[in-house]
Amino acid sequence: MKKVITIVIVVLVVIAFAVFLFKISPQSTPPSSYNGLVSTSGAKHLDQPPAFDPKTDHYQGNPNAKNVFIEYGDMQCPACAAYHDMMKQVPTTFPDTVFVFRYFPLVQIHQNTVEATLAVEAAGAQGKYWEMHDKLFNTQSDWEALGDPINQFAQYAQQVGVPNIDQFKSDITSKKYLSVIQQDSDQANGLNLQGTPSFFVNGHSIASGKDLNGLLQEAQQYLNK
């Protein structure tokens, strides 16, 4: 009898310890139904980014500028969030330069990146692209770990002046602009980019990790005067 009691006690202790470990151990993030729709393979090799097209690209500055600065970024990337205020200064700091933002969602590590990108596109469809773009970068720490941030995104959309919130939410849940994200992602993978943000000036890669003046100094060799 004592032997049975001892075994039961040992089993209970083991179970309790396992539960304790489960509670304190980092939990894996469930895959996002949005992230899984973006393919990360099969992209055609590219030597440089496709040419800037003011009809389809999101840009700031003069579309007829002599120089094109392209960022491939991820809406949930902390480094991109840190850089985004700096990037808004590119058209006024770089000589005769337009700034272009394209998507490179790191779907393997950022659970809400595709949903966030769809939210930016949905806001853009109602004339509030850059307002939503800035809002999501400025509030990234508030939504990055949410199980489903769509209601939070809807609040942000309302705050930045998106007129039709029901349409905004519908455009996200229907994945209406998924092809836009896939196209940019294919470019990034075709260029064999290793992370975000990744920068190009007139088709030439320049290294991140610098302030705006450092980026400008590195870009000088590629700028059209």
Image (cartoon, rainbow, N blue to C red):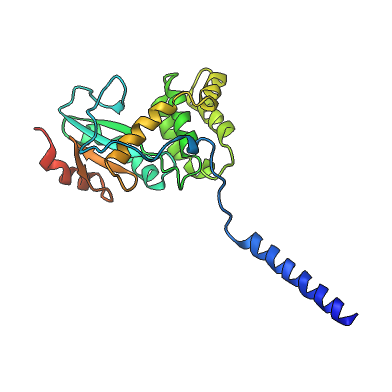
Quadrant in which the N terminus is drawn = bottom right
Furthest-front residue in this view: 42
Question: Where's residue 205, x and y in %?
Answer: 21, 43
Question: Where's residue 39, x and y in %?
Answer: 41, 37
Question: Who's the residue at 57% across and 58% down the image?
Answer: 26
Q: Nearer the viewer, residue 61 or 194?
A: 194
Question: With respect to residue 129, does 24 lie above or below?
Answer: below
Residue 127 visible at all: yes
Quadrant in which the C terminus is drawn = top left
Question: Where's residue 222, x and y in %?
Answer: 13, 39
Question: Who's the residue at 73% across and 67% down the image?
Answer: 15
Q: Quadrant of residue 80?
A: top left
Question: Where's residue 104, x and y in %?
Answer: 36, 39
Question: Who's the residue at 32% across and 40% down the image?
Answer: 189
Furthest-bottom residue in this view: 2
Question: With respect to residue 27, does 68 lie above or below?
Answer: above
Question: With respect to residue 79, does 72 lie above or below?
Answer: above
Furthest-right residue in this view: 1
Question: Who's the residue at 58% across and 55% down the image?
Answer: 27
Residue 87 visible at all: no
Left or right position of 106 against 94: right
Left or right position of 185 against 2: left
Q: How many marks?
A: 0
